[in-house]
Every structure is written in structure tokens, then in C-alpha cells.
Image (spheres, helix red, strand yellow):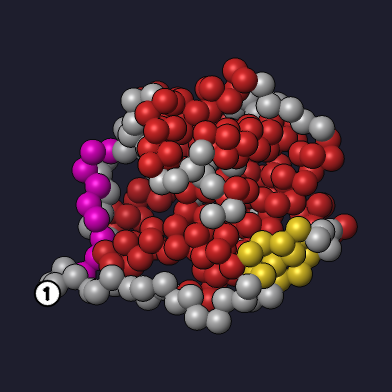
Amino acid sequence: MSKKWLVSLCLAASLSVVTACGGESTGEAEGKPSTQQEAPASGNSQASGPQSGEQPKMPEPDLKGIPAVVAEVNGEKIEKKEFVSAYEGQFQQAAMQAQMSGQKIDQGQMKEQTVNGMVSTELLIQEVADRGIEASQKDMNQTLDELAKQNQLKSGDEFMAALKKQGMSEKEVMDQLATQVKVEQLIKDEAGNTNVTEAELKAAYEQVKAQQAQMAQGGQGGKLPPLEEVKPELEKQVKKQKESEATQALVKELRKDAKVTINL
């Protein structure tokens, strides 16, 4: 497994914004969490999907015809094994959703989203090196603890032990962790002031309310809590959206001057 993508399935959400930076890409490349705004939990939501008979068979990823080098970014190769690892993570999430909804997966589009997400990530990593951004030990330890929490583990040490069981050395994990922290710092630098105003919170709440109403028409969802109850969660989502927009703008600029070849 390539060192650059070692912990691609458990990167923090702030790094996952790059999956939407490849132009038409809107999905979750590399199995990372989505940054799209979600309705705060209401406690009464129901899963959608077929209401009769048995569940559809879990689909399988189509990995036929994947070239040895999927893409090149300024001379840096994204190899087949890196792409397959990323694509399988994304596909697993999509397959579970498809099994519940009964909808088919457009694997061609998903492959395009995945490779564009990886190209965007590589562009950000290269920009980090160009700017000389460093990762402090404090930030790395904090990110490690956050990753542990995201993966339902008690501590960074427990998270590290789980990765070691997968055949990863501590140095490999820490190198990837440093890369993640540097990219997150780049994103913060680009986003600048992400303080959320009351007007932005109200607009986000109204958007969630509209989504909730639409879900209710289909027999899903529950009552939306008052704004004050979901304010902290909405604030995080709005900040995340601002970072996402800043990152997409940065990647768009970087891609203009980059030499990118996609072989899919």
C-alpha cells in the first residue's frame, strides 16, 4: 500500500473537502466523510428503501481495465493499487446506500469522482510542500485523538495499534498524519475567517428545515429541533462548508497551472 494513501479511509473531515474539488466531482472519494450539510439528528428518522421482499444483493465494485497508472499530477503518479484502495472505500459506502434505496450505482461516475478527488489531494499536498507548511507535534497528537474518536476507539494509542495490526508501521502512520495536518493548515489558511454569523445560521437552519419537509413527504424524518438546540452542530457545518468552498477555489487555481493526466 502506498505511504501517501495509508490512512485514506480515516482522514479527518476537514481533509475530505478535496473530494469535491475535481470539477464535476460530488461524491466521497477515498472513503472519506462527506462535507455536505446534513440535517441535525431528530431521533425519528427512518431508513429509505424497498418496502417489500428481500433486500437487493450487495453490488460488487467493477475493477476491470484499471490501468497501472491511473493519473499523473505534475509528474507524481497515482498508481492502480492506490486508486483501488480509494475506490473500494467509496464504493462500500455507496453500495450500502444502494442496497437500502434500491438504486443502481453509476460506477463510471464514481470512478471519475474518486480519481478527481485523488488528483485534488495530490495538488494540495504539493502546495503544502511549496509553501513550506509544517506540522506541530501538538496538532498531530490532537488529530490522532480525533481520528481515534471518529473510529470509535478510546485513544490515539489504540488507533495506532489498530493500524499496526493492518501492517502499517508507526513511521508510516505518523508521516501520513503529518501530511494530513499540513493540508488541514493549508485549508485553514485559505478559508481565513470562518466565524459564523446569526444570519448564516438562520439560513442554514431554513435549508435543513426545507430538507426535512421534503423527507417528511416521503414518510421519512422526524420533527426538527429548535434552532437553539442544533446551533452548535449547524455552526460546525457552516464552517466546514466555508472551508470546502475555499479549498475548491484553491484546487481550481492549482489545476489551471498543473500538468494533470488521467488515464481512466
Farthest-out residue, top: 138
Location of residue 56 by image quarter = bottom left
Horizontal and vertical percent for residue 212? 35, 48
Q: Quadrant of the N terminus?
A: bottom right
- Local packing at callout 1 (Cα closer than 10 Å; few below 14, some 14-19, many 20+) is few
- In this view of the protein, which residue sits in the foreground, 95 or 144? 144
Where disc 1 sits, the SS reads: loop
164 or 186, which lies in front? 164
* Image height of 121 relative to 97, above or below: above
Residue that appears at 43% across and 39% down:
164
Can residue 51 be seen here? The reply is yes
Percent of width and height locating residue 71: 69, 67
Look at label 1 and name its amino acid: Gly
Q: Is residue 35 magenta?
A: no
Q: Position of residue 252 (x, y in %)?
A: 77, 54
Identify the magenta region.
42-50
**Residue lying furthest right in this view?**
257
In the rendered structure, the answer to whether residue 28 lies left or right of residue 2 reads: left
Q: Residue at x 45, y 63 (%)?
A: 88
Q: Is residue 43 magenta?
A: yes
Give the image location of residue 183, x and y in percent.
68, 38
Magenta segment, prevailing SS (helix, strand or loop) = loop
Q: Residue visible at 50% across and 60% down?
A: 85
Above or below for 155 versus 241: above
Q: Decide which of 106, 236 is in the foreground and name it.
A: 106
At a point 54% along the width and 47% down the height, the residue shown is 6
Q: Number of callouts in the render?
A: 1
Please give the residue where the numbered disc 1 appears in the rendered image.
Answer: 53
